[in-house]
Image (cartoon, rainbow, N blue to C red):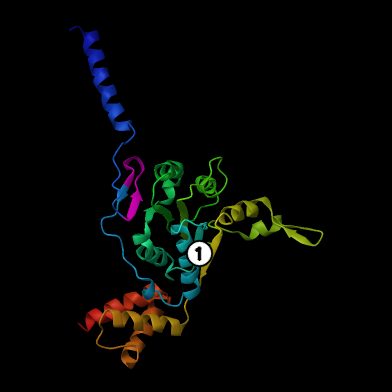
């Protein structure tokens, strides 16, 4: 074998390795799970142990629970329903509410697919996998926000409402965010607004931001808890964890308030963290 043939053989082996590396993945999807994660070229991967959250464990959000439960019930029943944006203060139960909804409706065919923000460009590919499936899918985007120069939100806008393809009837998007319009808002943008015949018309920058959040038909807002709400949540979790003392115990109450002051927050997350710590200390 001369040098030319050796070179061609090595080049052919190299091309075969590159083709194997970049070839589209054809992994068979195991549809026997209730929750999945999208992992790019690895496709949909099942979540072996989904985080089980009960709706009854989520306090001080009755309106939000009622609205998202009603919307999801319509969805799993085959009726029309809206995409949902849950926005507001951190630690107030936005993500937990979506997990609880999955727990509540999974026996009725509801499935959850978690997609990271940087993988939103794959949304068309994800949706193509779900078309025609008998299950009802929620695509879940947690802590969603975009910077001013981030163009990846266009993929989300197209799937929500704006693509030439009709949205599949068995797919909805539920997203959580600390920002109402999912993007930063600056004081200078107010200078773009104009008053025409007594009406305020937003500038192009503001309109672009609003156009994304408006594609969610249902908005659920979450606000910080007051002290009594925080203590009610602490009391609930102390009881759930079998604590030897409850919130009526003065030292327990004082320690719960001190815990919140140290963290600068009276959120549900902080309340649960305190209860877990306190119940563990008392054995």
Image point 26% across, 59% down: which residue? Answer: 49
> How far across and how far down the image is residue 196, in percent?
79, 57
Residue 36 drawn in magenta: yes
- Of 266 and 61, the residue lying toward us: 61
> How far across and how far down the image is residue 238, in percent?
30, 82
Image point 34% across, 93% down: which residue? Answer: 250
Task: Answer above or below: position of 238 versus 10.
Answer: below
State the image quarter where residue 282 is shown.
Answer: bottom left
Q: Helix or strand or loop: what does disc 1 sit on?
A: strand
- Of 219 and 208, the residue lying toward us: 219
- Of 242 and 250, the residue lying toward us: 242
Q: Is residue 156 left or right of residue 2?
A: right
The answer to whether residue 177 of the structure is visible from this angle is no
- Please state, as top left, top right, bottom left or bottom right, where the C terminus lies in the image: bottom left
Task: Answer above or below: position of 239 versus 191.
Answer: below
- Of 45 and 82, the residue lying toward us: 82
Please give the residue where the numbered disc 1 appears in the rendered image.
87
Image point 30% across, 44% down: which residue? Answer: 29
> How far across and how far down the image is residue 98, in percent?
41, 63
Residue numbers of the magenta segment: 34-44
Which residue is the extreme one toward the right? 197
Residue 223 drawn in magenta: no
């Amino acid at each position: 074998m001369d040098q030319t043939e050796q070179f061609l053989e090595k080049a052919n082996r190299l091309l075969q390795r590159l083709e194997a590396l970049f070839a589209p993945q054809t992994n068979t999807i195991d549809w026997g799970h209730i929750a999945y994660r999208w992992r790019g070229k690895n496709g949909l991967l099942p979540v072996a142990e989904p985080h089980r959250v009960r709706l009854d464990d989520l306090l001080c959000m009755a309106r939000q629970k009622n609205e998202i439960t009603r919307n999801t019930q319509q969805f799993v029943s085959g009726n029309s329903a809206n995409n949902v944006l849950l926005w507001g203060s951190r630690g107030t139960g936005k993500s937990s509410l979506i997990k609880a909804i999955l727990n509540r409706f999974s026996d009725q065919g509801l499935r959850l697919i978690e997609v990271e923000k940087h993988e939103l460009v794959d949304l068309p590919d994800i949706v193509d996998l779900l078309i025609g499936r008998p299950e009802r899918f929620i695509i879940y985007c947690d802590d969603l926000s975009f910077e001013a120069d981030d163009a990846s939100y266009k993929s989300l806008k197209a799937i929500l409402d704006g693509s030439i393809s009709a949205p599949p009837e068995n797919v909805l998007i539920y997203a959580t965010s600390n920002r109402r319009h999912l993007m930063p808002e600056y004081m200078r943008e107010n200078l773009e607004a104009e008053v025409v015949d007594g009406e305020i018309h937003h500038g192009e920058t503001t309109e672009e931001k609003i156009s994304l959040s408006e594609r969610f038909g249902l908005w659920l807002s979450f606000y910080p808890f007051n002290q009594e709400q925080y203590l009610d949540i602490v009391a609930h979790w102390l009881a759930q964890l079998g604590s030897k003392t409850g919130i009526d115990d003065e030292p327990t109450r004082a320690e719960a308030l001190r815990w919140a002051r140290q963290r600068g927050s009276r959120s549900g997350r902080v309340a649960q963290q305190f209860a877990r710590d306190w119940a563990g200390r008392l054995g």
